[in-house]
Image (tube, rainbow, N blue to C red):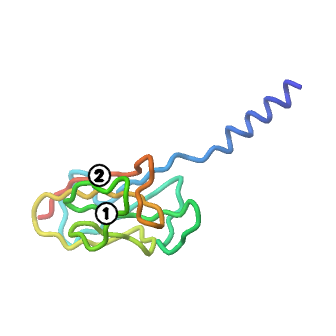
Amino acid sequence: MKTVIAAVTIGLLSAQAPPMTVEITAPLNGATVSSPVSIKLKSTGVRIAPASDEKAGSTHHHLFVDHELTWLNDTIPQGSTGIYHLARGQKEFVLDLKPGTHRVIALLARWDHVPLNPLVADTVTFTVK
């Protein structure tokens, strides 16, 4: 009987989903780059899909460029300067940025553009020469 309980417990532990993460892999934090800037994203524990995919668990990226995170409990607005919806499920995006220091926050949201709760985000700051 103890062996069966141990096997069931091990099975439950291995079935747990990995934590949800998003990482900006390029540019690196603190880097100096030229414009246009290629933003590259890596995610784990989620399924990146177009925003039109309304299945449970589908997410897509949003980029907040030199913009504060607001709308954390509501739909991220479209048409706001500095907020980019990667609604086709993209994992890369090119930004044409002026010289200077810039901050990019990558944020995962559901198909309806509402951020995941708890928040899944990553931030980099870099300089465009």
* Of marks 2 and 1, the one in the foreground: 1
* Marker disc for residue 124: none
Q: How far across and down, in percent of the image, does residue 58 sit?
A: 53, 64
Q: Amino acid at mark 2?
A: Thr
> To which quarter of the image does residue 109 belong?
bottom left
> Which residue is depicted at the point 53% across and 53% down?
45
> To which quarter of the image does residue 32 belong?
bottom left
* Marker disc for residue 63: 1
**Quadrant including the N terminus:** top right
Number of numbered discs: 2
> Which residue is depicted at the point 10% across and 66% down?
99
Q: In this image, 101 relative to 108: left or right?
A: left
> Is 11 drawn above or below residue 71 in the view shown?
above
Q: In this image, 27 relative to 86: left or right?
A: left
Q: In this image, 80 relative to 61: left or right?
A: left
Q: In this image, 11 relative to 104: left or right?
A: right
Q: How far across and down, in percent of the image, does residue 57 sit?
A: 56, 59
Q: How far across and down, in percent of the image, does residue 104 sit?
A: 26, 58
Q: Which residue is mark 2?
A: 123
For mark 2, give the secondary structure.
strand
Q: Are marks 2 and 1 in contact (CB under 8 Å)?
A: no
> To which quarter of the image does residue 76 belong?
bottom left
Q: Earlier in the sequence, mark 2 or mark 1?
A: 1
> Which residue is depicted at the point 85% across and 24% down?
2
Identity of the residue furthest to the top in this view? 2
Q: Amino acid at mark 1?
A: Leu
